[in-house]
Image (cartoon, rainbow, N blue to C red):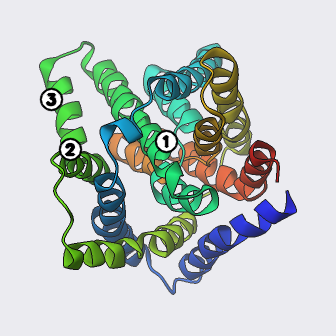
Amino acid sequence: MLAIFLKTLPFFALIGLGYWAGRTRFFTQEATAYLTKFVFYFALSAMLFRFSANLSIADVWNGRLVAAYLWGTAFVYGIATLVCYARRLNIETTAMEAQCAVIGNTGFLGVPMLTLLLGAEAIGPVMLALAVDLIVFSSLIVILITGSRDGRMSIGILRTVGLGLLKNPMIVAISAGLIWSALRIPIPAPMNEFLALLGAAATPGALFAIGASLASKSAERISVAGWLSFCKLVLHPLFVAFAAFVLFKVEPFEATVIISAAALPVAGNVYILAQHYNVAPARVSAAILVSTTLSIVTVSLWIGWLTGA
């Protein structure tokens, strides 16, 4: 367990460095926004394209794994939703809290950290978990909030969801890489080196950006943030583990990867949604801050237990 903690510590140290830079205003919010754009649109996309271009659909797709991750995620989403209904929250706030309970920082933290900790073969399961988050649950929150405000479902809502997916650089990079692989086109050496060089900036850039963005987060509504952090850091990986090991009998290594992905803290893009729709940004901000802080310990505990380290 100590060995895993020491391996994860450099990742969280980079987040801490970014937090210091943001807190001291060495990195302004504008600088953080531009760094995040660079990582999101360029560095991380290059990393995901290069990874997926060297994989085949057969290497990535695993129906049992998708079912296990989807079942575990949906179950916790349901628990968070029921708790919101018991507290008499409206549909928009309920959707936002449920999103916090299940959507982890898989793109910025999970992809670089899990592939380095668990090996390059972890990229396939990580990308599947990321795809489920982006395609299913990121679409669901848009449908729930927009539908609640309009009072009905419409073609416009589905158009918004579809365009959102088509414009997401992570979805585009993964899809383009898999298509490149399916066409069996070799990556030219200069292109491969370019992608490797650009993709290498994803890990430090993403972690630094996470920390710098946390500096602007507040710790309001701690009780709610604590509950949502418990859902994300404990219940989510717990139910994904149950689904993977008991219900769908996922191969042990792949199960380890998706459970580790489920154990990641609340994703920063949930706050972007909260700001965009003006739905509970303070509690989402607090959930991201609390869950990321606690995950320094909890992620190590989960990975240590899963790998027997």
**Residue with the mark numbered 1:** 125
> In the rendered structure, which amino acid carries the disc numbered 2?
Ala
Helix, strand or loop for disc 3? helix
CB atoms of marks 3 and 1 within 8 Å: no
Question: In the rendered structure, which disc, 3 or 1, sits on the residue that comes first in sequence?
Answer: 1
Question: Can residue 219 be seen?
Answer: no
Q: Which residue sits at x=56%, y=24%?
A: 68
**Residue with the mark numbered 3:** 159
> In the rendered structure, which amino acid carries the disc numbered 3?
Arg
Residue 118 horizontal/vertical position (percent): 62, 55
Mark 1 surroundings within 10 Å by alpha-carbon count, few (fewer than 14), some (14 through 19), many (20 or more): many
**Residue with the mark numbered 2:** 182
Foreground mark, 2 or 3?
2
Identify whether 143 is placed above or below 12. above
Q: Which residue sits at x=67%, y=44%?
A: 221
CB atoms of marks 2 and 3 within 8 Å: no
Mark 3 surroundings within 10 Å by alpha-carbon count, few (fewer than 14), some (14 through 19), many (20 or more): few
Foreground mark, 3 or 1?
1
> In the rendered structure, which amino acid carries the disc numbered 1?
Pro
